[in-house]
Image: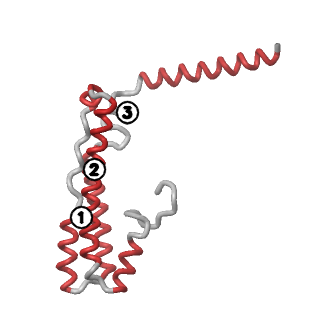
Amino acid sequence: MTSFRKHLLIGMTALSLGIGSVASLAQTPAGGPMGGAGAMGDHGKFGERMKEHMAKRAAELHDKLKLNPTQEKAWNAYMDKVKPGELPARPDRAELDKLTAPERMERRLAHMKDAEKRMEQHVAATKEFYAVLTPEQKKIFDEEFRHGAGRHWQGGPRR
């Protein structure tokens, strides 16, 4: 009988926690826990912060490379090709809800193909610029991009 009571108590506790979490989700405002903008905050502000961060990193890299006048022209062409554009518009939630699962998957695939095209353009531009660098500059460039876009990647989330 003691085992039955223990199982009953555990079951009731789990049930009450489940009901409590469902109730709290029902009270969450539309768009997620952060309100209408979602967990990332305002999409436009995020894009602006990202552009500022990328401009700062580009300026730092430019200074580290110590480019000569000939390379400066290649740098400007490179920056024009890899500069961030407008972030893709977020799909309308109501519109997505009307689509079938295969249609939503096709939308996601189209988005991924667009991202792949942009990455191919960045790779081509990087190869073009990289070709004009000296071996010492290539080492600096390689070090800056050793672990993707982030520097000093240690694994796990950045703080």
Q: Is residue 68 above or below residue 6?
A: below
Mark number displayed over residue 32: 3
**10 Å crowding of disc 3: few (<14), some (14-19), many (20+):** few
Q: What residue type is disc 3 on? A: Gly
Labels 2 & 3 near each other (Cβ < 8 A): no
Give residue 141's quadrant in the image.
bottom left
Question: Considering depth in this image, is 73 or 109 the residue closer to the camera?
Answer: 109
Q: Is residue 151 above or below residue 101?
A: below
Q: Is residue 51 above or below residue 92?
A: below
User: Going 28% across and 52% down the picture, which residue do you hit?
Assistant: 115
Give the residue pinned by disc 1.
Answer: 82
Give the residue pinned by disc 2.
Answer: 113
> Secondary structure under badge 3?
loop
User: Going 46% across and 57% down the picture, which residue do you hit?
Assistant: 158
Question: Considering depth in this image, is 140 or 110 the residue closer to the camera?
Answer: 110
Report the label total: 3
In primary-sequence order, the first of circles 2 and 3 is: 3
Distance of label 1 from label 2 (alpha carbons): 17 Å
Q: Is residue 4 above or below residue 112?
A: above
Distance of label 1 from label 3 (alpha carbons): 32 Å
In primary-sequence order, the first of circles 1 and 3 is: 3
